[in-house]
Image (cartoon, rainbow, N blue to C red):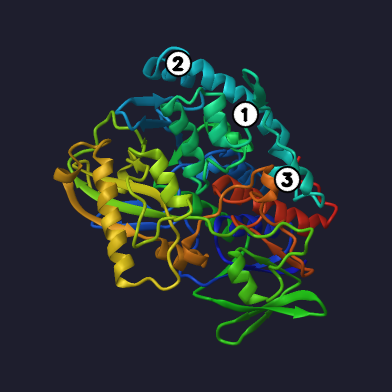
Amino acid sequence: MARIVVIGAGMGAMTAAARLAVAGHRVVVHERAATYGGVLGRVERDGFGFDTGPSVLHLPAVYRDLFVKTGKQPLEDCVELSQIEPAVRHVFADGTTTDLPNASRGGVGEALDATLGAGAGARWSAFMNRAREAWDRTRRPLLEEPLWPNWRVLAEREPYPSVAEKRLLRRERRATTLAEIAAFELGGEPRLTALLEHFALARGLDPRTAPASAAVLPYMEQTFGTWAAHGGMRALATAVYERCLARKVEFAFASAVVRIVEKDGRAAGVELADGTVVDADFVVAGVAPDVLARLLPGAGTRGADEVPPQSGLPSRLTVLLALRGARPKEAPHRTVVHATDRARELDSLFGDRPATPTRPTSAATVTVTRPDDSTSRPDADHEAVTLTATVPAAPDSPDEASREALAVQAESLITHAERAIPDLRDRLLWHEVRAPADIAEATGADGGSVPAPSLAAADGRRLHPGNSARVEGLFTVGGWSHPGGGLPHAGMSGALVAGLIVEGPEFQGSQ
């Protein structure tokens, strides 16, 4: 039985902890905050309840596997999950609205034909068939296996089978980015373009530079479905936490780790803020790269042949709205209200002069979440709504001007969300803003940056470092390491780290 210290109680860290405890190890989790869950936070006020992180789950099979492997109670006995229908409503810049069904690629095609015109569905379906090929080629190396030592094969080879665009008297072109897929293969139709590019934008990626392999993002969502949890996604975090407790994982909250102890070139434990040293045979760090670098200088650095940590990713702005009046029965759980000027939005986020808190993104695409969940409201005559948008990361030292700018942008999101909820302002009781600085406080990531999932191609710029650190006995878990950000990816990273510790370097991934 090994002694294992886990730094942080995020989803990836807790997934690793539960799996390691089942394997017979003694696992202690040290979390600097007062609670578990990482980005899966929850705000409760006046009987209203809001998720402050992801509001839906894709690929629930990841967590089903966790619960099967760590106990007798399956996931659905611990969390009430339901497929939402429709999966999402899109409100495009021209006012066109379309509802896309859940886990039905054929239904998505029919819905697009009905709202965007004949042929739109066929173009999207043909694209999704090619996206399936990219998924089949990358699923194991990017999600189910430790990062290959020869990861440059993933970096150099584009798995998406793009279609050649033949041009008279000119060399044919093939899509290498998500934006080029929209232009070459979706005919440049502005609403299909907005639909496709949203999958990158929502994850903090510029569709103009995101590799064509990002086609796996819409494929994953539209093939495997979108799920909500009674009690919000915080309920999923609670279920994983309780599974850890059932497997005798120990938790120490408000217990900040200030240093990873190294002995003879190996991680040998951690030092806490009060000076206590906790010995360990292995250390699992579920923290951002800059935090890891402070805990053990050199641990997070990479050699010339290793994947460098990603940096400069945007953050999220979340606005929590308490509304008077009942939630309409026909209201979708999730609505994406697209920016009125898509090019301007992308330029302000990713251009040569990116937006800053004092010069924020204008007319940002906003996701409106309206859960049909009794735990989110004081009674049936009220409704809780959450608005989320991708925004620049917070500056190192937020000043009054930047805070005022975020407040202005929050008001802009509320106004933009009226395209989905026309009577929003009339019903508004109060609102709270969760800024990038709040994410930075919760996760330790510089500026509150949110990690994106790993993607193939793009010279490896969209890969994340492997889970085995340069220091022996130290492993990294969570969104900033392989296979990247997102709830499913966090669960997969936990499984990979557990496999590497239990089976050793010969571990080849889940079967």
- Lower position in the chain sequence, tag 3 or tag 1: 1
Q: What's the residue type where badge 1 is placed?
A: Ala
Marks 3 and 1 sit apart, C-alpha to C-alpha, by 18 Å
Q: Find residue 462 and report its horizontal and vertical position in percent.
A: 64, 49
Tell me whether the residue at label 1 lies in contact with that at label 2, contact meaning CB atoms closer than 8 angstroms: no
Camera-side residue: 433 or 94? 94
Secondary element at tag 1? helix
Residue 202 shows in this picture:
yes
Residue under label 3, please give it: 155
Residue furthest to the front: 169
Q: Which mark is residue 110?
A: 2
> Image height check: is 152 above or below 45?
above
Secondary element at tag 2? helix
Q: What's the residue type where badge 3 is placed?
A: Ala
Q: Find residue 122 and report its horizontal and vertical position in percent.
A: 52, 15
Residue furthest to the left: 426
Camera-side residue: 268 or 183? 183
Q: Find residue 55 and report its horizontal and vertical position in percent.
A: 42, 45
Secondary element at tag 3? helix
- Lower position in the chain sequence, tag 3 or tag 2: 2
- Lower position in the chain sequence, tag 1 or tag 2: 2
Marks 1 and 2 sit apart, C-alpha to C-alpha, by 18 Å
**Residue displayed at 67% across by 45% down:** 458
Q: What's the residue type where badge 2 is placed?
A: Glu
Residue 510 shows in this picture:
no
Q: Quadrant of the C terminus?
A: top right
Marks 3 and 2 sit apart, C-alpha to C-alpha, by 35 Å
Q: Dot 2 surroundings within 10 Å: few (below 14), some, or many (20 or more)?
A: many
Residue under label 1, please give it: 131
